């Protein structure tokens, strides 16, 4: 049967597919099949192998995370602007999330293995993945900040508006049970919140599994995060339809990405790097693959409060920390800053720039002084294209980063500030050599998204519990065993899942120095040129 049009009357359809040029879309078309997204259908389950990539044309899919007590919390939503399972393009892997349809619709589906093959041949598909990941990082970070800062009623209003955006309708096919799962609260809490929204006129009715909203009044109830998130995600989608510098390079340069460095006119200093590297991602590489990077790595040190990356700036360097701790910060419309995750020697800052030149969706600030190896993003892209092992460690890191962000989103929705502060202190303790953390109360206030007075009160409670021995002159001395007793279960659950993912998958041998096979049929050009009614016969699938 013929595949449905990628774009449909009224401007609908999946935006990632619609942004592809015909030669790039042709790599996918024979394998795409139309599917219905039924209400409450599970498209991916955490821990299961990703078998298909879904490109929704309509409807809405919620990304859910399962907590230790069996509770589920929604961390983000995907509609026609994105895809489910697309991270599998970086390599075969179990899903880190559960994806559930919360508003029925339609999608195009392709086997993950077939999508990987097309991804390896097409810079345009790599750019599409980059735009999607940027949008997801933005959604996770703003969701984490919103959950830390705002009460549940305004967060419910944000979710309802978000769902309305995805289905483009004021009648939402949503039960109170689904809302309780999305928000991570009890049904009785949802009932009370719905009653309050009805009284304000923000909800007209909620019967028989449908909620009718008054959008203008609901917007007045919601926090500013909804509009910020919508603009940021739409901006990421628009970037995907703009001309990409990665796609705009000539045919010879596309094979040799190192030419981008010469063309940039920048002088990147090069120093020798020790073989016994402290960064876990670098340490996981076979010698031949690490050898692609070592001539270009530069050892640097960073001090507390050093800004390594600013949101919106061009990502021209990739950092592999050997020590210290780096916090990802999100700036809220009211000027407040909130930390969303931490990174140390287990990660790499700006590693997703391997998919093509891009701007940062985060601000990264050093919270604990340390050292790192730095390489130009252009040189790293060249090595990434030549090495299957480097592509594998980037994929594992991307999945662990997204998993950590999802846990923070859920934790901020479910737990009180005392348990969350203990979690942050434990995460910092994991990245320093002793029990004394170089951390001011001002920095803790930014990490938690709370006032200094709240930090002072919470610290006094932790001292009373013996979890903190002292906090003077910018240092916090912790008793780890007692701090673990105070922390919410998120810390243990998050670390167990991330350690399992990292330890098992980074130790898996990978074929060294296996390059991408670029498609000679894929040409550069305007990534955003609009497809007319593109149709492809699915009968050609093998």
Image (cartoon, rainbow, N blue to C red):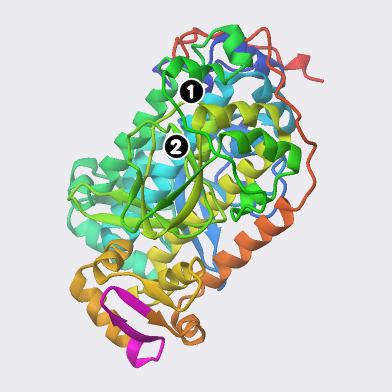
Return the residue at label 1: 13
Is residue 541 found left or right of 147 in the rendered image? right
Q: Residue at x 72, y 41 (%)?
A: 92
Foreground residue among 124 and 379: 379
Secondary element under disc 1, as helix, strand or loop, is: loop
> Tag on residue 236?
none
Label 1 crowd bin: few (<14), some (14–19), many (20+), radius 10 Å: many
Question: Which of the 4 quarters of the picture holds residue 200?
Answer: bottom left
Q: Are marks 2 and 1 in contact (CB under 8 Å)?
A: no
Magenta residues, start to end: 462-476
Is residue 480 found left or right of 500 in the rendered image? left
Return the residue at label 2: 134
**Magenta stretch contains residue 474:** yes
Question: Which of the 4 quarters of the picture holds residue 424?
Answer: bottom left
Image quarter (top left, top right, bottom left or bottom right) of the C terminus:
top right
Foreground residue among 461 and 432: 432
Q: Is residue 388 above or below residue 44?
A: above
Image x and y of residue 83, in percent:
54, 34
Q: Nearer the viewer, mark 2 or mark 1?
A: 2
């Amino acid at each position: 049967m013929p595949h449905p049009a990628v774009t449909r009357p009224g401007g609908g359809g999946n935006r990632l597919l619609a942004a592809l040029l015909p030669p790039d879309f042709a790599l996918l078309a024979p394998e795409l099949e139309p599917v219905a997204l039924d209400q409450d259908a599970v498209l991916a389950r955490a821990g299961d192998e990703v078998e298909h990539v879904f490109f929704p044309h309509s409807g809405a899919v919620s990304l859910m995370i399962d907590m230790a007590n069996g509770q589920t919390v929604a961390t983000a939503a995907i509609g026609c602007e994105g895809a489910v399972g697309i991270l599998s393009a970086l390599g075969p892997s179990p899903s880190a999330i559960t994806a559930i349809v919360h508003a029925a619709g339609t999608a195009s589906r392709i086997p993950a293995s077939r999508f990987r093959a097309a991804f390896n041949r097409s810079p345009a598909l790599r750019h599409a993945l980059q735009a999607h990941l940027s949008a997801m990082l933005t959604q996770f970070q703003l969701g984490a900040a919103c959950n830390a800062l705002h009460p549940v009623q305004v967060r419910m209003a944000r979710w309802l508006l978000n769902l309305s955006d995805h289905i483009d309708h004021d009648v939402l096919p949503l039960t109170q049970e689904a809302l309780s799962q999305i928000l991570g609260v009890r049904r009785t809490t949802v009932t009370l919140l719905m009653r309050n929204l009805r009284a304000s006129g923000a909800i007209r009715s909620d019967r028989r599994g449908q909620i009718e909203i008054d959008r203008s009044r609901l917007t007045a109830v919601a926090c500013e995060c909804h509009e910020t998130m919508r603009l940021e995600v739409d901006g990421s989608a628009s970037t995907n339809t703009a001309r990409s510098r990665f796609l705009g390079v000539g045919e010879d340069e596309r094979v040799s990405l190192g030419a981008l460095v010469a063309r940039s006119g920048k002088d990147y200093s090069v120093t020798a790097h020790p073989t016994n590297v402290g960064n876990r991602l670098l340490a996981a590489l076979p010698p031949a693959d690490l050898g692609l990077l070592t001539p270009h790595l530069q050892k640097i040190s960073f001090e507390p409060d050093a800004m390594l990356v600013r949101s919106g700036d061009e990502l021209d360097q990739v950092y592999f920390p050997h020590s210290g701790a780096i916090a990802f910060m999100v700036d809220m419309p009211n000027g407040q800053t909130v930390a969303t995750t931490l990174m140390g020697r287990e990660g790499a800052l700006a590693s997703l720039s391997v998919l093509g030149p891009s701007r940062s969706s985060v601000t990264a600030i050093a919270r604990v002084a340390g050292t790192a190896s730095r390489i130009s993003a252009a040189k790293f892209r060249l090595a990434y294209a030549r090495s299957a092992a480097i592509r594998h460690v980037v994929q594992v890191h991307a999945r662990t980063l997204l998993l950590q962000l999802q846990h923070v989103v859920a934790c901020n929705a479910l737990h009180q500030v005392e348990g969350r502060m203990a979690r942050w202190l434990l995460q910092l303790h994991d990245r320093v050599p002793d029990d004394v953390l170089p951390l001011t109360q001002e920095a803790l206030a930014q990490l938690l998204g709370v006032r200094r007075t709240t930090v002072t009160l919470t610290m006094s409670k932790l001292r009373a519990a013996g979890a903190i021995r002292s906090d003077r002159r910018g240092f916090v001395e912790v008793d780890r065993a007692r701090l673990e007793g105070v922390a919410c279960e998120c810390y243990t659950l998050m670390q167990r899942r991330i350690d399992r993912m990292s330890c098992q998958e980074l130790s898996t041998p990978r074929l060294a120095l296996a390059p991408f096979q670029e498609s000679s049929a894929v040409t550069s050009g305007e990534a955003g040129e609009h497809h007319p009614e593109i149709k492809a016969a699915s009968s050609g699938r093998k």
